[in-house]
Image: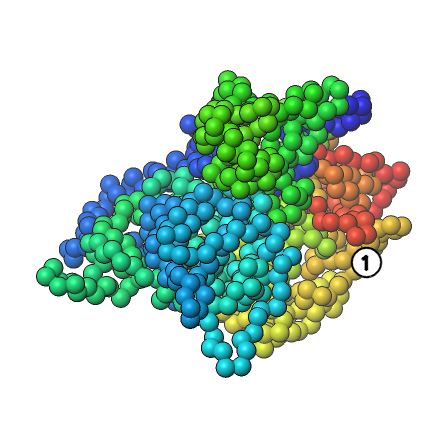
Amino acid sequence: METRSLQDFQDLCTFEGFKSFRHYYGYGVDQQELIDREFKRIKGVTYLDHAGTTLFPESHIKGFHDDISRNVYGNPHSHNSSSRLTHDTVESVRYKILEHFNTSPEDYSVIFTSGCTAALKLVADTFPWKPMSNEEPGSQFCYLTDNHTSVVGIRGATALQGVGTIFVPPRDVETRARKKQTQTNGEEECSTPHLFCYPAQSNFSGKKYPLNYVKGIQSQQLYPACEHHGRWFVLLDAACFVSCSPLDLSQYPADFVPISFYKMFGFPTGLGALLVRNEAAEVLRKTYFGGGTAAAYLVEENYFVPKHNLASRFEDGTISFLDIISLHHGFETLQKLTGSMTNIQLHTFGLAHYTYTVLSCLCHSNGKHVAQIYCDNDFQSIAEQGAIINFSLLDCHGRTVGYSQVDKMASLFNIHIRTGCFCNTGACQHYLAISNRNVKSNLHAGHICGDNIDLVDGHPTGSLRVSFGMALSEVTMSKDGKKNSSSHTLTNLFIYPVKSCASFEVTEWPLGPQGLLYDRLWMVVNENGVCLSQKREPKLCLIRPVIWLASNTLKLQVSGSEAVTIPLDPILEKSDLRTSQSKVCGDRVQTVDCGEEVSAWLSEFLGKPCRLIRQRPEFMRDMKFGGGKGDYCPTPLSLVNEAQFLLINRASVCFLQEGIANRHDSDNEGTWSDTEQLVQRFRANLVISAKEPFAEDNWSHLTIGSTQFQVIGKCGRCQMIGVDQKTATRTHEPLRSLSECRSGKVTFGVYLAHQSAKNSTHPVLAIGDHVIPKISDSTDKL
């Protein structure tokens, strides 16, 4: 490698390089504290087999333990109070599962099984396979060649029934698609049932297959459904996919969806489910009946009537009810620690993308690559690739190093990976170029699935798989790097979704076209449409907004009251949305009313009629001064007063804090020892740590992380900083001391504008980003 390329690679391998490469790491909390609290058992371990099983957080087990320690759960087939509690809790878990996949009991049923394989076997045993006859064609069992062994194994059940089998290379689904065949006049519509099975995500390579295949097969638009008359059903193997990605069954209504819960939560390990679309359930034919499935039966006659409820018909015997109850705590813990499956997806894909990039760059001293990565993409799209990297290591001559040898070396360093073919022979053959003849000859050579024979005649029989999951691992990368030379860092990030309401503090956040994404897009107005601020209504600071990007909602909450939730992005075609015009700092802005519910909530809290309005998405309001030049875009504003961003310096806050403390007549003397409360009074978006107070006054430009900003001017202060953001009470400080310690000036902090190049993507700011300022040529800059 060239010296410059080597330096770039070394920078990439530092933690700072990682953060600049991927901004979505973790879940917006102190990562080390979370690891110490929830995953301390993996200290010193690098666990990279989450596709095998993810790791449960300790609070999941504690919550479950506390639950079963407090409550008596009886057999749900009884009718005593403990049994009814079990029944009701299990039904609540069924609903929570459906809610997790964005569907409902009206559309889907949950059948608990011992795992994903048992769910697949249930479909194999109950699907109404029809052998070919003179009257109509027989059923077809079809599957992608990139499928788990347990899916291909359905073939064992269908072969005995005279059912046809079609193996489908992934490329053929779309390349061989054609218009559905139409019935000829007088020909009856064919009702022969067929089943197409494919994985939402390959457990071998992590490749995500299009979820719209579901409707494409059901409507007979895609191959092989387009070539066979009948009724087509889709089995979507979601076991690997749902561990790190959200699945919306309302949008992709697969008929049968098998899952395993240990891949989602790490616990329990012997529980799965088959999610069955109710419209498809009617075709299933079950022969064996076990305890709890019968409405009535006779022992002396062949008489049996199944229960009406689908789950009750298919769950033979007593279900693993305690394991099922533990799922409630799995969902609760997942939401509490991560916020959403979308956050897990961003976190895990970021790690996979970074790992792919590092592996792709690694070379021996002679320039030959260290790794051969088995994938069909370059890890750029989260819709096409999951959190799995499959690869082989190569020596300096380009020869494959056996996976068993790599696994032994990894174990020496406590690195846990998966090796072999991962119960996916089809994908293994495809990526490793193993022919059918090779498979048979390897067997004769003594190699069987799951053993340690990793090379036969120098050719690999399997590979290495690294996979990421919900659980965080300790970051052991070097924190040394060129970027550490800066003495200024970003210490706090605040968003103010609703103008004059409380802040929403985050650890990282994307920039939008008008500043920080969703910053000051809403404001409260009185019955006449006039903006309310803390100058008139200090109680506004007690309203705490919370943004949920995953659910696309904004929640407003105050202590002692129920919260109210509104969508982040209004659907403008809704007839009940009222548009209006309001003014901000003399500018007329176009807004949308947010509805009656939030209006009533605000009016009750503030004790006067008021409404919440949002800036219309398409409305643009330009900054009045300091516009962009050259290759930079104009500077659009949200409902802010002056500029896109407000920055303050902690050194300046501490300087002012000392000035207040030195005034013996300062009101509420005891409260000024809290630096964070004083920081809150200045309502800045960006809080940095610099060595000198008011150094920011002399900056003309600065770079935060890799994002460039222009300093627009100093922020003039008013009596609003006299409102205590914690209690809504008014004080003379800090405005009085600010004027005194700055010789009559009442400026504090500087306004910034993001210098975004045309057609550029929106960057992300994160706590800890380094701040590199450029000193202004003139210290009299306003």
Q: Quadrant of residue 227?
A: bottom right
Q: Position of residue 655 (x, y in %)?
A: 67, 34
Q: How is the image coloured?
A: rainbow
Q: Is residue 749 visible?
A: yes
Q: Which residue is mark 1?
A: 624
Percent of width and height locating residue 472: 51, 35
Query: Closer to the camera, 765 or 678?
Result: 765
Q: Residues within 10 Å of mark 1 (few under 14, many from 20)?
A: few
Is 16 placed left or right of 310 in the picture? right
Q: Quadrant of the N terminus?
A: top right
Residue type, label 1 = Lys
Between 362 and 599, which is closer to the camera in this rendering? 362
Q: Name the residue rendered at 39%, 53% in the picture.
A: 158
The structure residue drawn at horizontal position 20% and vertical position 54%, both measured from the top left corner, is 291
Q: Residue at x 44, y 48 (%)?
A: 151
Q: Is residue 387 toward the left or the right of residue 270 in the image?
A: right
Q: Residue 525, position in %: x, y? A: 61, 67
- Give percent across and percent down for residue 519: 65, 54
Secondary structure under tag 1 reads: loop
* Residue sitting nearer the eye, 450 or 58: 450
Is residue 17 visible from the viewing direction of this image?
A: no
Picture residue at 61% right of the left edge, 54% below the top: 172
Q: Is residue 71 left or right of residue 446?
A: left
